[in-house]
Image: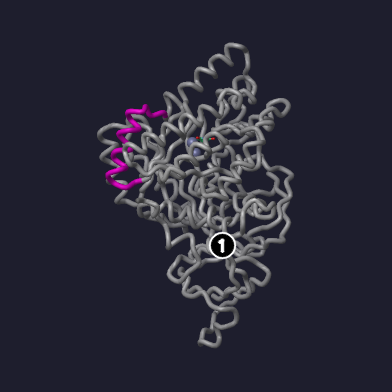
């Protein structure tokens, strides 16, 4: 198949080029119109004139079918990866959750079971270390050999996921030895719980108190502590879902000091703010996620961080719960609102909005949404780039297409959208996953089970 006439966008810039792929693999990137001259007779030609040709989006932070907060996230690997593909994402990396008292291998086996036969696009797995002990530390090495090269730890959620500093140190020492990346949910959960207890004692039960009880200072403190522990253990560190200016400044200072630490943010922190949680009635529950949405003034700083590479990746933390059912668990007490927002479908388009707003360049868009995620999590150059030898994960993106976001028309299995009524300019027109067209002419033709597990290498940013 030859894709002609498009502008190929890479982390290096934009060039007019034709892209040839054969089977599942890209075979050539050619000067426009030169294919015939060198004797290539494509079986199929796709005209991409006026469109961008991108490496498929890579969302390295999703939670499909995850038991959490007394319920489970409502997208499974089939509905979640289908929605991802509609939005121009061709690879996800999901979190397998270790049970307390359970092994990491059980978690991974469970997640393979959820994904196999269901995923429409390729997927990798991270492991959540919820129980750091001698056995699970040894298992880290085994998982690295299986292509699971990143482990998430929590400084938040005491009693559920929280690891103590000594547990974090043990996991970091292990990662320092085996090269795995430590992904950190950096919020001081013990301190937050104290603030939450006081709020409840004062009768504050509405959704907006979720935000008011999780101050940015306690995100910054945890980011600082995580960086300190990573420094002394020499563990590769990646801060997930960074949401606020002080936390970003802490990362920036560390990077300026030469430390090899990385951070991710999410579209919801770039585009939504804390006022959403104060919507009338119980509507604010739709916007309850952790870290919480912040005051609007943080957004400009997060865009700054994306430009300066103090933020290296944008992923969604897609963790959808239905408003009519799951979110109602917290009707009388914000503590019981399942934390999480739907987002896997609109990441590429929201970041493209960042391009049209003048916040990031086209090249940076592709870099933070595909190329760096691939390199950070050991999938490059199979993923994240349009080059000979790479998987033919390709998005033909129409930068002029108009779309109206609504729960009525989105493809995620959830009954609301946090971007309801937004008009976005730009849309994935054709999506190709390992050489198979899965979306074309507003028709999805991908098949559950075709997505393959991606066995990942270590981070390419490892020193
Ligand atoms: N934050 C969320 O919003 N949902 C799932 C877990 C998390 O850390
Ligand atoms: Zn988290
Ligand atoms: Zn998450």
Please state the horizontal and vertical placement of residue 228, each as a whole percent of the image: 39, 34
Q: Crowding near pointer 1: few (<14 within 10 Å), some, many (20+)? A: many
Which secondary structure lies at badge 1?
A: strand
Q: Is 221 situated above or below 351?
A: above
Q: Residue at x 54, y 82 (%)?
A: 35
| For residue 65, side relative to residue 106 (left or right) | right
Query: Which span is picked out in magenta?
Result: 162-180
Q: Nearer the viewer, residue 281 or 120?
A: 281
Q: Is residue 135 magenta?
A: no
Residue at image position (57%, 50%) is: 307
- Quarter of image, res 282: top right
Residue 138 vs 440, above or below: the answer is above
Residue 255 image point, x, y percent? 45, 44
Instruction: Assess whether residue 163 is covered by the magenta stretch.
Output: yes
The quadrant of the picture occupied by the N terminus is bottom right
Judged by its main secondary structure, the magenta piece is: helix
């Amino acid at each position: 198949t030859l894709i002609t006439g498009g502008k190929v966008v890479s982390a290096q810039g934009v060039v007019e080029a034709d892209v040839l792929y054969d089977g599942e693999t890209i075979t050539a990137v050619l000067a426009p119109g030169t294919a015939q001259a060198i004797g290539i007779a494509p079986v199929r030609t796709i005209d991409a004139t006026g469109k961008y040709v991108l490496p498929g989006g890579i969302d390295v932070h999703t939670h499909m079918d995850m038991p959490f907060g007394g319920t489970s996230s409502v997208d499974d690997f089939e509905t979640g990866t289908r929605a991802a593909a509609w939005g121009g994402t061709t690879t996800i990396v999901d979190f397998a959750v270790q049970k307390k008292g359970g092994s990491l291998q059980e978690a991974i086996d469970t997640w393979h079971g959820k994904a196999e036969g269901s995923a429409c696009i390729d997927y990798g797995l991270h492991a959540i270390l919820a129980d750091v002990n001698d056995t699970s530390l040894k298992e880290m090495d085994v998982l690295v050999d299986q292509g699971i090269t990143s482990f998430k730890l929590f400084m938040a959620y005491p009693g559920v996921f929280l690891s103590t500093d000594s547990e974090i140190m043990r996991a970091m020492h292990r990662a320092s030895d085996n090269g795995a990346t430590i992904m950190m949910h950096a919020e001081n959960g013990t301190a937050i719980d104290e603030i939450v207890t006081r709020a409840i004692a004062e009768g504050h039960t509405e959704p907006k108190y979720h935000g008011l009880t999780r101050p940015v200072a306690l995100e910054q403190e945890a980011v600082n502590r995580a960086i300190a522990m990573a420094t002394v253990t020499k563990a590769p560190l990646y801060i997930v879902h960074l949401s606020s200016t002080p936390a970003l400044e802490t990362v920036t200072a560390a990077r300026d000091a030469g430390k090899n630490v990385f951070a991710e943010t999410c579209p919801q922190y770039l585009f939504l703010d804390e006022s959403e949680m104060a919507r009338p009635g119980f509507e604010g529950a739709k916007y309850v996620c952790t870290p919480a949405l912040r005051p609007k003034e943080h957004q400009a700083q997060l865009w700054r961080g994306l430009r300066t590479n103090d933020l290296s990746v944008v992923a969604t933390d897609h963790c959808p719960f239905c408003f009519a059912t799951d979110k109602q668990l917290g009707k009388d007490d914000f503590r019981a609102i399942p934390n999480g927002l739907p987002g896997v479908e609109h990441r590429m388009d929201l970041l493209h909005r960042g391009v049209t707003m003048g916040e990031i360049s086209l090249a940076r868009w592709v870099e933070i949404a595909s190329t760096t995620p691939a390199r950070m999590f050991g999938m490059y150059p199979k993923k994240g780039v349009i080059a000979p030898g790479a998987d033919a994960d390709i998005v033909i993106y129409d930068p002029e297409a108009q779309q109206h976001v609504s729960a009525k028309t989105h493809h995620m299995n959830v009954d609301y959208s946090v971007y309801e009524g937004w008009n976005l300019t730009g849309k994935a027109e054709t999506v190709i996953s390992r050489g198979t067209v899965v979306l074309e002419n507003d028709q999805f033709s991908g098949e559950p089970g075709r997505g393959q597990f991606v066995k990942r290498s270590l981070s390419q940013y490892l020193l």
